[in-house]
Image (cartoon, grey):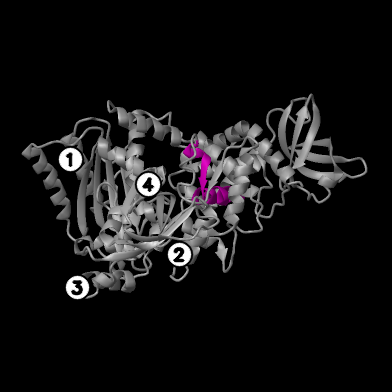
Amino acid sequence: MNNIILNGMLRDFADRHSLKQQNESGLFEKFCNYCVLSNDHYDSFEFDKVETGDALGIDGVAAVIGDAIIDQAEDATRFTQTQFSADFHFIQAKTSSSFDLGEFLKFTAAVRKFFQNDRDQVPEELHSAFDVKEVIYSRAGKLTALPTLRLWYCYSGEFQIKEKPVLGSIDAEVEALKALLYKFSDVSLTIVGATDLAGMYREAQNNTVGRVSFQRHVALPKMERATAAYIGVMRCKDYVDLIKKSNGEINKGLFYENVRDYLGIKNPVNKEIGQTISSLSSRDQFALLNNGVTLVASKVVPSGDTFELQRFQVVNGCQTSHVLFGSEESLSNDMHLTVKLIETSDADLTNEIIRSTNSQSLVMKEALATTRPYHRVLEDFFSALQGEGFRFLYERRPHQFDDVPGITQERIVSAPSLMKSFVSVVLEEPHKVHYYYGRLLEEYSTGETSELFSDDQYPGLYYAAHHIASRVRLKVLNDRNLKPWAFHIALLVKHQLAPGLNKAASFTDKNFRQLIDKITSDFEPAFKKAADFIRSKRFGKDENRLPAKTSEIVEGFRSAVSRPKSSSASSNADGDYIGRFESIDVDRGLVKIRYGSSLVEASVEADRFKLARNGELVRFAKKRGVVVQAELVSRVQN
């Protein structure tokens, strides 16, 4: 690409997401998918969810239910049990600086084929999205409205075409999609040039600055954890301008902290808000009849009546904001909105505000999950290990580390990604990691108790799990055969290096550090063994989602690593071995280990083996023909 600004952003994007090995076209596709989708769907966006591989004409696809990107039919079924809204996004990304009508026509033709009924006519890379689409339309009776279709054609030039034949062809393609009966409530095409992409990237990075006129306000008394706070009213029109993106759409990225999705204009409360706006007799009383909104910003710079807000979120008032945005043409100059504006970088205060301002309405359980105190414990634990040479930071709040220079995305661990590591490595269910994170919270919760983020869990369980899973994912990033099995490989690495890493494990800080050091130093050979084992099995597509396959893999791997090789352990061959416990001579401090047809002895601390059961796996090492180390692999030693 020849665009200097876009090239700079692409390099920044590659650095942040550790994508330096990608070719330019593949990197640009990821970049465009990120720019279009991540800001509005921060907690459900993942590159793997929306990428389309080699599918002709389409470089990104997202089926959105509510505000979450859903890529599995199982999750689509869960999300459509009650009334729901749905949107489809299709993206084509071209590094060319000129608009290519031929490529555009391939794009729209592929989209039309997707909305026909023959799954076999759709590229395999789109089958999961196709299945989600089928679930959505099969539940049409619960749709708040027919889905919207959003087309995005992204390229590195600027759209300045004025030729009528070209413009006519573009319009005709959009009209052909609109003509598909009973499919869409609206179809829109956005041609995204370099300048637009740059603006979208800044928005996705939360780098935009909002300015708003806040004429009638008072500063609240100084508070311990809030550097500034204001309360007052601002014109509804000004507020709507504040929550818009550069392309005129509502900035959904401002509402992650709010915890409630927009419930639609048919919702009784929202319908009443809309009626107030449209009523000539009551619209000037809007500030009295509405509870208003609460904004939290990392920086507030007042200058007279104009306030500049940096990295701000709407933590309460999602419904009001959406109704005002949807009624923008009906807003009058005498309509005002009550606004609380708080400047703070204290995540705990933000969480308290979120919990208190959202406690009076029904919210999804996962929405408030990361506001619990345990997540502060996790953040502090991850942060403390930074000083000891380890690399991860736990992100309790979206964009929490955006202001910290030199931090790449691979170092930032969100709650959804941490759940996947924990579920696959500690709970040993990697076949569930494709679930939407809210479903994981639901599955592992019973009443008031949960197996995820429980107050009595040692935080190192989460750190160790992610330490393994993230390294595996980085290793298989560009391997199409292994990538779907990343979390299974992570589980096999765990079985070799930290087999006692389970939900019942008891750690001290000392043996946790020993465990992390062992994972770090011995990772490469353990990964190779696990990856070679998975590669040798030649599993079929989507078998990584089957519980029975996980059991088969674990048992098969255990048998493979405990099977004697061509060199007997009783010989002088040095190396690492896994055998089975046979007996212990407590007085002599000797343990007997069965390895194939051989029986070997090792000097050990007897207390470590006094509870061992016959047949239990034992890892041992030989050096110069002598067993120098032996340890049970089925539990963590304290």
- Say which mark, if any, is on residue 280: 3
Give the residue at mark 1. Answer: 105
Q: Which residues are magenta?
A: 407-428
Labels 2 & 3 near each other (Cβ < 8 A): no
Nearest to viewer (mark 1 / mark 2)? 2
Give the residue at mark 2. Answer: 364
What kind of element bears circle 2?
Answer: loop
Instruction: Answer left or right for 247 relative to 630.
Output: left
The mark that comes first in sequence, 1 or 2, is 1
Magenta span contains residue 351: no
Crowding at label 3, few (<14), some or many (≥20) Cα neighbours within 10 Å? few
The mark that comes first in sequence, 2 or 3, is 3
Crowding at label 1, few (<14), some or many (≥20) Cα neighbours within 10 Å? some
The mark that comes first in sequence, 1 or 3, is 1
- Tell me how far mark 2 sits from mark 3, CA to CA: 36 Å
What kind of element bears circle 3?
Answer: loop
The kind of residue on which mark 3 rests is Leu
